[in-house]
Amino acid sequence: MREKAGSDSYNRFEYQAHWILYHMLDNVQNKKPFLIYCEFHDDMAESEHSPSPTGMNFYQVKTTNTKEQWTLGSLFQKSKRTDGSYKNSFLGFIFYNFEKFSNECSSCHFISNADFDDEVLEWQSVVKDRKELKHENLTLYTKIKNYVKLEYPVMPQHDFDTVFDRFIQNTFFNKSPLSLEGHVDQVKGVFFEIASRYNLDIKSGYLLLTNIIDSVRKKTRTIIRTPISYEDLKKKKGISSDIFDELEEKFSSIPKHNELYSSIEGHLKGNGLSNIQSNAILRGLKKHHKKFLDIADTLYQDIISGFIQEVDELVDSNFDVLDDFTVKNELLENLIEAFLKQHTHQEINSIVLRGVFYETILSE
């Protein structure tokens, strides 16, 4: 049971980290500057990207493999601690955010892989249209208020009413587009869809993706003490759209595909390959570049990533002899023959792998 609990905790952490990256990528696609804070007050907080942000939006990311829909009852369900006391429910904790961080908390968002029932959707339909729930549906408003009051029975009524009205109008629910089983590949697909605009080669793309998700993990785990200055908070817990602006600058300095094709063609012909042979390898590489934009085919991406890793290992092991084209070609033939025996994909053949090989060894 302890091993399963540890595994579940890790899976929740990984889902949360990938959802944060997905949220950032969505902002990048919509050209929206952002500044997010990993595990600050909630699973994630977000402010406008400015020297003096006026407020924050808090995000709670919750996964479940037992619920098809969240109901008000399940959202207000409290869990028991080992000492016999009770923790706040999910929505009770969100109410706490509005009370505790009244000067910071502009809105709270509950994100989950599961859907929401009709009452929650009714609540959302009203407040997202910027109407007041107590005027549009007093029965639902009162039901939710009674749930919250059970968790805050001694809070002065005037204070409770003030916080509750902010809570009811500024709490939002969204079903995550990421599935429990496929979230890693889904985020990878979105990342490479963005990276493809810059003709980024696969090896560099995987390296950048790994660096960014590792940064999210690291900042999520970083423990801070409060009070803390805004600058220190940004440094220790924050990730901004600046990171993608910097990546864009780096992308623009990477040789474009046409430059890469010319470099490979010159290398192949300079080492005695005929026009027919050189053109076949270039066609294989171009076919690969086109196929790699198919973000739904994660098997293809994984197989190619594995091949690139084996190419790197081959280069490291045979560095001193790779200037000899005959030896290099023999090593390549042996590598491709062994690799194709272990990996099968209808779009991957020896010509495609030759193109990927030369892209890998000739790219800076």
Image (tube, helix red, strand yellow):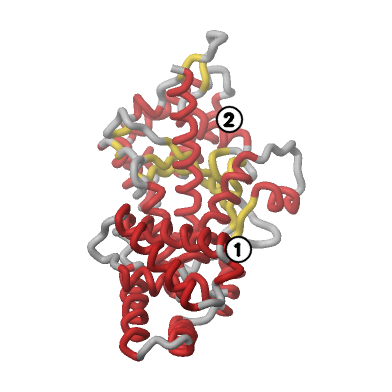
Residue at left offset 48%, top offset 89%: 270
Measured as percent of width and height from the top left, residue 89 is found at 46, 25
Type of the residue with mark 1: Ile
From the image, state whether disc 1 or disc 2 is nearer to you.
Answer: 1
Label 1's element? helix
The one nearer the camera, 201 or 46, is 201
- Up/down of 349 relative to 150, above or below: below
Type of the residue with mark 2: Asp
Q: Which mark is residue 163?
A: none
Measured as percent of width and height from the top left, residue 216 is found at 57, 49
Q: Quadrant of the N terminus?
A: top left
Query: Which residue in the protein does label 1 denote?
Result: 243
Would residue 134 be visible to someone looking at this image? yes
Query: Which residue in the protein does label 2 denote?
Result: 159
The one nearer the camera, 100 or 345, is 345
Label 2's element? helix
The one nearer the camera, 169 or 240, is 240
The quarter holding residue 280 reads bottom left
